[in-house]
Image (spheres, helix red, strand yellow):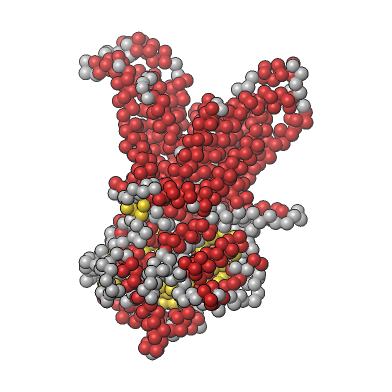
C-alpha cells in the first residue's frame, strides 16, 4: 500500500506547501485542530460556568422574580450562617460519605475476587457484567428501586413472606442510601479492580515467603496498593451523590432535603437562580478539596 | 338563585381581596400616597386584546394543574377540541403556584400560551408583565358566569381582565377509610403523634397558612383572623407547629401525582389534598375519602391567563371558549371535585352525578365560599394598613427551614 | 493461593453482588409486562397489553423523536469536535496542554446539576430561547468528552512510527490520514460515537435545565413517574430505554475490547 502511495502522482502544488508548513510547525496544526473544540468549550461551557459564579452574587426581586444585577454577598451569607443550610449541606456530605464507604466495602472483596481468584475468562465476563447496569438508564434503575422499596413493593412482601416485619423503607434516607450505593457501585468496582489487577502476584508470593498468612498479605500488600483505586472510585461516588437531585426527589421522604433538590427547586419553583448558583458552588468547592486530597493519595494514576 | 343574598358573603370576601390587592400594590413601590381608588397599572395594561378570534395556529401549550387538561374527559373530550379547532394540546403540569410563576417567567418565554393560575399567583404574574389582557367578549359563556367571578380583584385590575375565571375549590383532608373508619373532624389529625409516618402535606410555603388556620381555631388567644396576614408572633407559632409536625410526616408532596402514589402504595394514610387526588384514587378503587374539618379550609380560585409572548393566542381563546362552556365546566367540576364559575353548569352536573351540584355548592356558593380562605400572596402590609405582617419571601425561607 | 473457604466465600460474595446489580433491572423489565396497572408486588400476571398503547401514544412518540434527533445531532457534533481535540492533544505538547486536558474532563467531573444550571443561566442571559438547539448544545458538551477520551486512548496506543513511515514513502498528509490513521482509529471513533449517543439518550439532569417546553424521553419519564397516572407506560418506555442504551454500549465494548467504556464510565 505504501509503495502504491509512492507511485501515485504527487498532489498538485496547491496543498503541498500547506501540508509541509503544518508538518514543520506542529503547534500550528495543533492550534487549528484545537480551535473549534476549544472555542466551543470556552465560549459556551466556561462562559456558562463563569456566568453562574457571577450570578451567585446577584439577587432576585422577590415580587417579580426577575434577576437584579445588584452585587451582594447575601446568598453566601445565608448559606454559611443559616443553620438550615448547614444542616442540608452536612446531611448531603454524610450521605455521600456513607455511600462511599458502603460501595468501597462491597467493591473490595468483589474486585479481589475478579483480580486474583477468577480465571481470565471469568474476569472478562465479570467486567462486562459490572459495566452493563451502569449503562442501563439511570432513571430506570432509580424507578425500579421505588417499586421495590415502597409499601406494597418487593422488599416488604419478601420480608412478610418469611415472617419478618415489613421494614417500610420507602421514602426514607435509608432508601436513598441504598439507591445511591446501588447506582454508583460499578464506578467503585472498576478502578478498584484495575488497581488490584496491577499488583503483581510475585509480591504476594514474597510476602508468603516471608511468613505472612494470606489475609495478612492482603492487608499489608494488596490494600495499600489498591487504595488509590478505591480513592479514585470514591471521587465518583462522592461527587455524584453531592450533586444529584433525581434520587432525593423520587426516593426521598420528609427528611430528605439535600443540596441537589434545594438547587433544583430554587431554579424550577422559586426561580431564584442566584441562590441556586450560590448553593451549587458548595459541591464544587467540596469536590475541589476532595480532589486535592485524592491526588495526594495517588488516585489520579488509577483513573 | 338570588345573587344579591348569596353574594353578600362573597362580596365581603372579594372586598378583602381587593383591599389586599390595593395594599399589596402600595407596598410594592407606588408613590406611597393613600391606598388609592385607582390601582397601579400593570406593565401589559396597554396591550389591546383582539376583537375577533383568528384562525387556530395548530398548537396550544398550557401550564396547568393536574386534572385541568385531562385526556380521560369523555364528554366533551380534548380530542374533540383538537379535531374541531386543529389546535393540538400539550400540557405541562405544575405542582404549586410558585412553579407556575417560575415557568411563566419572561411572558411564558415564547413557549407557553396559557396558565391556569390560582389567586396567589395571579397578581405576581400580572405585575411582572408575564400575562396580557384578555377580551371577555370573545367568550360567549362569560355572561353566564357568577357575577363575582366575572371581575374578581385577583385577575381584573382597573376594569381590564387579565384572564378568564375557571373554577374554584377547597384544600381538603384526605384519609384512608380503612385506617380511619370514622371520618376525622379536625385538622388536628395531621398534627397528632399517633399518626407518625402516615401523614403527607404539600411541599408549598403557603401551607403555613393552613397551620395558622388550625391555630386560629385551637389557640384563639393568638388572634389570627386571616391566615395569610400574620404578625411575627402568629407566624412563629405556625412555624413551631409545623416543625413539630415534621417528624410525623412521611413525605411532603410537590405535585398531586406524588400524593396519589403515596396513598396508592399505602405509604401515607392521611394528608392535606385537593379533591382531585380523592377522585382519582376512588376511580382506582382505593379506600379513600375526603372532608373539610370544622376549622374550615384554605382554597383557591383559578383563572386561565394568556401569556404575554404566547405563540398561539387564537388557539388560546378557542380553548378558553371551550373550557367555559357549561358541559366542559360541569365535567371538570365533577371529575376534579371543584366548583364551576358558569351558572349553567349546575344542571349538567346533576345529570352527570346526581347531588354533585349541591355537594360542590355550585348553586348556592355564598356561605360555602365564606368558609374557604382563598390563596393570596402574603405581603408586609396587613389589612388594617399596618406594616407588621410577614411577606411571602419570609414564608419561603421559613418553609425551607421547616422541611429540612 | 487463598484457602478453599476463602475462595468459596469470595465466590458467593461475587454472586451476591451480581444479583444486587441485576435484580432491579430484571424487575423493571418484568413490570413492563404487568397485566394490571397497579404497581404492587407480586405481579398479578403477565401480558403485553401495554406495549401497543405505549407505542401509539403521541406524547411518547414526540419525546422519542426528540431524543433521537438530539442524540444524533449531539453525537455528530461531538464526533467532529472530540476527534479534533484528541488529535491536537496527542501529538503535540504545547504550553497549557495539561490545562486544556483538564478542561475537557470538566463536564463529566463537575456534578451534572452545575453544568445544567450554568447552561440555563447562560441561555437566559443571552436571551436564547430554550429549544432543541439548547438541548443539543448541552448534550454535545459532555459527548465531546466521551469521544475525546476514546480517540485519545486509541491514539496513544497507535505507533507514531507508522505515520512517519507512510510519509517517508511519499504519502502526503491527506493520504496518510485517509489510509493509515483513519483505519487505525476508526473503531475507537465509532465506539466513542456509540457511547456518546447512549449518554445523550439517557441524560436527564442537564436536559432538565436546557429544555424548554419540549420533552425528551428521559424528561417524559421523570415527569410521568411523578404524575403517577401512567405507570404501565412508564414501565414499557423505561425498558425500551434500557435496551436502546445497552446495545450501543455492547457494540462499543466489542470495538474497543472493553477499555473504552471503562475509562469514561458514566
- The residue located at (68%, 40%) in the rendering is C16
Residue B344 pos. (x, y %): 38, 82
Where, quadrant-wise, is the N terminus of chain A in this rendering?
Answer: top left
Instruction: Identify whether B146 is placed above or below B125.
Output: below
The picture quadrant where one finds residue A225 is top right
Residue A137 pos. (x, y %): 52, 44
Frontmost residue, C126 versus A118: C126
Instruction: Identify whether C90 is placed above or below C67.
Output: above
Side (left or right) of A123 relative to B82? right
Residue B232 pos. (x, y %): 47, 67
Residue B30 pos. (x, y %): 27, 66
Instruction: Identify whether C239 is placed above or below C192.
Output: below
Side (left or right) of C22 relative to B356? right
Please state the total of marks drawn on the protein image. Answer: 0
Instruction: Identify whether B302 is placed above or below B107.
Output: below
Frontmost residue, B133 versus C73: B133
Frontmost residue, B372 versus B103: B372
- The residue located at (62%, 39%) in the rendering is A101
- The residue located at (33%, 67%) in the rendering is B27
Amino acid at each position: 500500500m505504501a509503495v502504491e502511495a509512492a507511485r501515485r502522482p504527487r498532489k498538485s502544488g496547491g496543498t503541498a506547501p500547506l501540508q509541509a508548513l503544518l508538518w514543520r510547525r506542529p503547534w500550528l496544526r495543533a492550534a487549528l485542530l484545537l480551535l473549534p473544540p476549544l472555542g466551543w468549550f470556552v465560549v459556551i461551557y466556561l462562559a456558562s460556568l463563569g456566568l453562574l459564579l457571577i450570578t451567585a452574587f446577584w439577587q432576585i426581586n422577590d415580587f417579580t422574580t426577575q434577576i437584579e444585577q445588584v452585587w451582594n454577598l447575601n446568598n453566601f451569607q445565608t448559606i454559611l450562617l443559616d443553620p438550615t443550610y448547614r444542616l442540608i449541606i452536612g446531611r448531603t456530605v454524610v450521605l455521600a460519605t456513607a455511600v462511599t464507604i458502603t460501595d468501597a466495602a462491597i467493591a473490595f472483596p468483589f474486585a479481589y475476587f475478579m483480580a486474583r481468584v477468577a480465571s481470565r475468562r471469568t474476569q472478562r465476563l465479570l467486567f462486562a457484567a459490572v459495566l452493563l447496569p451502569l449503562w442501563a438508564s439511570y432513571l430506570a434503575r432509580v424507578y425500579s428501586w421505588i417499586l421495590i422499596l415502597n409499601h406494597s413493593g418487593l422488599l416488604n412482601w419478601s420480608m412478610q413472606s418469611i415472617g419478618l416485619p415489613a421494614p417500610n423503607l420507602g421514602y426514607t434516607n435509608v432508601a436513598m442510601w441504598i439507591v445511591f450505593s446501588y447506582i454508583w457501585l460499578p464506578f467503585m468496582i472498576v478502578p478498584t479492580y484495575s488497581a488490584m489487577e496491577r499488583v503483581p502476584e510475585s509480591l504476594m508470593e514474597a510476602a508468603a515467603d516471608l511468613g505472612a498468612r494470606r489475609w495478612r498479605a492482603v492487608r499489608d500488600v494488596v490494600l495499600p496498593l489498591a487504595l488509590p483505586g478505591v480513592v479514585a472510585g470514591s471521587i465518583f461516588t462522592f461527587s455524584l451523590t453531592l450533586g444529584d437531585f433525581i434520587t432525593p426527589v423520587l426516593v426521598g421522604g420528609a427528611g430528605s432535603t439535600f443540596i441537589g433538590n434545594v438547587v433544583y427547586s430554587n431554579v424550577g419553583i422559586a426561580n431564584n437562580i442566584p441562590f441556586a448558583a450560590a448553593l451549587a458552588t458548595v459541591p464544587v468547592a467540596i469536590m475541589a478539596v476532595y480532589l486535592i486530597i485524592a491526588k495526594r493519595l495517588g488516585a489520579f494514576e488509577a483513573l | 338563585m338570588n345573587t344579591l343574598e348569596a353574594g353578600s358573603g362573597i362580596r365581603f370576601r372579594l372586598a378583602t381581596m381587593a383591599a389586599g390587592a390595593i395594599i399589596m400594590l402600595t407596598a410594592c413601590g407606588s408613590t406611597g400616597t393613600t391606598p388609592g381608588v385607582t390601582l397601579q397599572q400593570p406593565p401589559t395594561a396597554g396591550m389591546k386584546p383582539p376583537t375577533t378570534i383568528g384562525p387556530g395556529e395548530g398548537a396550544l401549550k398550557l401550564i396547568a394543574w393536574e386534572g385541568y387538561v385531562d385526556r380521560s374527559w369523555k364528554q366533551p373530550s380534548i380530542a374533540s377540541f383538537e379535531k374541531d379547532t386543529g389546535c393540538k394540546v400539550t400540557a405541562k403540569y405544575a405542582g404549586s403556584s410558585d412553579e407556575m410563576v417560575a415557568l411563566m417567567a419572561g411572558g411564558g418565554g415564547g413557549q407557553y400560551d396559557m396558565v391556569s393560575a390560582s389567586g396567589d399567583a395571579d397578581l405576581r404574574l400580572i405585575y411582572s408583565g408575564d400575562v396580557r389582557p384578555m377580551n371577555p367578549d370573545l367568550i360567549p359563556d362569560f355572561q353566564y358566569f357568577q357575577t363575582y367571578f366575572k371581575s374578581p380583584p385577583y385577575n381584573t385590575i382597573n376594569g381590564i381582565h387579565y384572564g378568564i375565571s375557571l373554577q374554584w375549590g377547597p384544600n381538603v383532608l384526605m384519609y384512608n377509610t380503612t385506617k380511619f373508619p370514622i371520618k376525622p373532624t379536625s385538622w388536628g389529625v395531621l398534627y397528632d403523634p399517633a399518626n407518625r409516618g402516615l401523614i403527607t402535606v404539600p411541599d408549598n410555603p403557603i401551607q403555613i397558612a393552613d397551620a395558622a388556620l388550625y391555630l386560629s381555631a385551637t389557640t384563639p388567644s393568638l388572634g389570627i383572623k386571616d391566615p395569610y396576614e400574620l404578625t411575627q408572633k402568629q407566624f412563629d407559632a405556625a412555624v413551631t407547629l409545623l416543625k413539630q409536625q415534621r417528624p410525623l410526616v412521611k413525605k411532603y408532596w410537590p405535585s398531586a401525582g406524588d400524593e396519589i402514589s403515596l396513598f396508592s402504595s399505602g405509604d401515607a394514610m392521611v394528608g392535606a389534598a385537593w379533591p382531585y387526588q380523592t377522585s382519582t384514587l376512588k376511580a382506582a378503587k382505593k379506600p379513600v375519602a375526603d372532608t373539610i374539618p370544622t376549622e374550615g379550609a384554605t382554597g383557591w380560585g383559578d383563572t386561565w391567563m394568556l401569556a404575554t409572548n404566547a405563540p398561539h393566542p387564537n388557539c388560546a381563546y378557542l380553548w378558553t371558549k371551550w373550557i367555559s362552556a357549561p358541559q366542559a365546566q360541569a365535567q371538570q367540576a365533577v371529575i376534579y371535585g371543584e366548583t364551576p364559575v358558569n351558572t349553567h353548569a349546575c344542571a349538567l352536573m346533576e345529570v352527570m352525578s346526581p347531588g354533585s351540584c349541591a355537594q360542590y355548592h355550585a348553586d348556592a356558593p355564598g356561605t360555602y365560599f365564606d368558609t374557604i380562605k382563598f390563596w393570596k400572596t402574603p405581603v408586609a402590609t396587613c389589612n388594617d394598613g399596618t406594616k407588621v405582617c410577614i411577606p411571602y419571601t419570609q414564608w419561603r425561607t421559613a418553609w425551607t427551614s421547616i422541611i429540612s | 493461593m487463598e484457602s478453599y473457604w476463602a475462595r468459596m466465600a469470595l465466590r458467593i460474595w461475587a454472586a451476591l453482588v451480581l444479583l444486587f446489580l441485576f435484580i432491579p433491572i430484571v424487575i423493571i423489565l418484568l413490570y413492563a409486562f404487568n397485566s394490571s396497572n397497579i404497581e404492587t408486588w407480586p405481579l398479578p400476571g403477565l401480558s403485553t397489553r401495554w406495549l401497543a398503547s405505549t407505542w401509539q401514544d403521541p406524547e411518547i412518540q414526540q419525546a422519542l423523536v426528540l431524543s433521537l434527533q438530539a442524540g444524533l445531532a449531539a453525537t455528530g457534533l461531538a464526533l467532529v469536535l472530540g476527534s479534533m481535540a484528541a488529535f491536537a492533544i496527542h501529538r503535540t505538547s504545547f504550553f497549557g496542554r495539561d490545562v486544556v486536558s483538564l478542561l475537557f474532563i470538566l463536564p463529566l467531573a463537575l456534578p451534572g446539576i452545575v453544568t445544567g444550571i450554568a447552561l440555563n443561566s447562560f441561555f437566559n442571559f443571552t436571551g436564547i430561547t430554550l429549544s432543541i438547539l439548547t438541548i443539543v448544545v448541552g448534550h454535545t458538551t459532555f459527548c465531546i468528552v466521551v469521544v475525546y477520551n476514546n480517540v485519545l486512548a486509541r491514539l496513544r496506543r497507535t505507533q507514531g512510527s507508522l505515520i512517519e513511515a507512510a510519509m517517508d514513502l511519499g504519502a502526503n498528509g491527506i493520504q496518510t490520514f485517509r489510509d493509515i490513521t483513519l483505519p487505525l482509529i476508526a473503531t475507537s471513533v465509532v465506539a466513542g460515537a456509540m457511547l456518546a449517543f447512549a449518554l445523550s439518550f439517557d441524560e436527564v439532569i442537564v436536559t432538565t435545565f436546557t429544555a424548554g417546553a419540549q420533552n425528551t424521553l428521559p424528561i417524559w419519564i421523570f415527569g410521568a413517574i411523578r404524575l403517577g397516572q401512567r405507570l404501565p407506560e412508564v414501565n414499557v418506555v423505561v425498558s425500551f430505554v434500557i435496551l436502546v442504551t445497552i446495545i450501543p454500549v455492547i457494540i462499543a465494548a466489542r470495538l474497543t475490547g472493553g477499555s473504552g467504556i471503562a475509562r469514561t464510565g458514566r
